[in-house]
Image: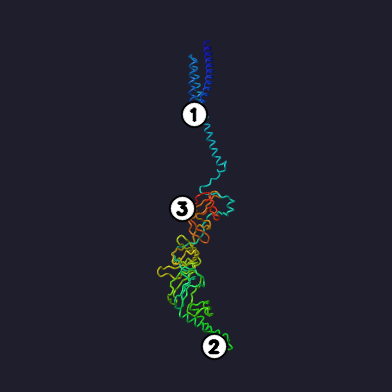
Amino acid sequence: MLRKLLILTLLLSLSACSKDESATDKHNEKNDHVEHAEHKDTEHHGSEKQATHTDHDEHKDDEHHSSEAQGSHDDHAEHKDDEHHGSEKQTSHSDHAEHKDTEHHSEKAEAGDDDGHGHGGHEEAPGSVDITAQQMQTAGIVVEPLKLSDVKVSIRAPGEVRLNAYNTIKVSPRINAQVIARHAVLGDEVVKGQDLVTLSSVEMAEAQGQLLLADKEWSRVKKLGRKVVSARRYITAKVEYEKSYANAKAFGMNEYEIKDLLSQKHSADGSFKLVAQQAGRVIHDKFIVGERIEAGYELMVISDESTMWVEARVTPQVTNSVDIGNYAEVLLGDEKFPARVIQLHHSLDETTRTSAVRLAVANDNDHLHAGMFVTAFIETQNTSKAIQVPEESVLRSSDGDWQIMVEQDEAGEFKAVEVELKKVSNGMAIIESKGKNKIGPGTRVVTHGAFFVQSELAKGGFEIHNH
């Protein structure tokens, strides 16, 4: 019976503790709301825990006095502490779940940047540009793989620029004379038939007098006719006129001067003019007015410098591998001039024991002049393997280097790659790798429309040169 009373007392005590706990919880919630209104959120959690435990401890001291009740309360306190720690664990777990959820959403957001927004499939390489198929078709862009081709081997030889002797004339008198006047100076461009210098000579005066007499006699005989004058006189008059005319012309008078002399527009004073026999530039001028000149003296040299010669010196063995018509290139400083082999000398220089290969070089910009030393690159009949591309596919970069447009892993994506330009011949350029930029057979490059690709790179603000 006593055992039953003890159990009943314990149950009543437990019931009272439950009520006390409920009251305490309500009291704590009220305090929590008050303190939450007075303090910030960061201070709230620490104050809430302290206030809750303090109030609960006071409540426990007032309400529980018996040892059994105290023991029950201790058990309850332990139970509540477990619940408290469980709540903390639950809160921690909830925070952890929120953290994981945040990371999950962050990863989804990053994945969305790649896939959801269409940028995850292909990322453009630095310094490259993407060109659509429509743009390539409109701009006429052609992409082809590089391949090795048979190219002629060139030899390097020193050379000297010379006048084109076939387009050069010397101006000199055929008789002794004195310079009366000058009509052209050094460096002048002259045309065919232009007056260059006026001379005067006693021999010319005699020739002019004889021509006038012969012309009058011949005019009289022709007027009388063959029926009136004897055949001998007729022939003699004709021969004298033709001989006098030829002498005056051989001494230096031109057709117009002779005509003026015979029409009395020009007197037989011995003066005559030397004229240009071809168009060109006065490149030599060695006389002064009043100077007496001997027959054959070189007064002027006139040359057409639109085409110059280069005499390249090579060994006899090299000459055997060079043919007339082979392509060549003349290098003057950084400037290059296309040329052709036009003659091969068949005798050696006695001093150097070398043979000369004559090249014809176009000199449209008038940069080549006789006496300049140059370097010549002459094609031979020997061949080697090299990479050739159309000349238009090799462009100058902003810093002056040569570059080509190389297609990347994706079709339509291009990047500028610097190369070495070894030679340009007949519209084709021979190129090689430069530095770390390796190219070779199979590398896909823009062969037509490279300028458009370079312009698109410049618009994108990319540096279009690599070192």
Image coords of residue 359 (percent x, y): 48, 66
Q: Secondary structure at mark 2?
A: helix
- In the displayed orientation, state which residue is furthest to the left: 351
Image coords of residue 413 (percent x, y): 54, 49
Q: Secondary structure at mark 3?
A: loop
**Which residue, given by chain and number where applicable, does mark 2 sit on?**
233
Q: Is residue 103 above or below residue 14?
A: below
Of label 3 and label 1, which has the lower sequence position?
Answer: 1
Q: Is residue 169 above or below residue 2?
A: below
Distance Cα–Cα, label 2 vs label 1? 145 Å
Give the foreground label among 2 and 3: 2
**Which residue, given by chain and number where applicable, does mark 1 sit on?**
42
Image coords of residue 67 (percent x, y): 48, 14
Distance Cα–Cα, label 3 vs label 1? 62 Å
Q: Residues within 10 Å of mark 3 (few under 14, many from 20)?
A: few
Residue type at numbered disc 3:
Gly
Q: Secondary structure at mark 1?
A: helix
Image coords of residue 290 (percent x, y): 43, 75
- 100 or 336, which is in the foreground? 336
The reply to whether the C-beta atoms of the residues labelled 2 and 1 are less than 8 Å apart is no
**Which residue, given by chain and number where applicable, does mark 3 sit on?**
435
Residue type at numbered disc 1:
Thr
Give the foreground label among 3 and 1: 1
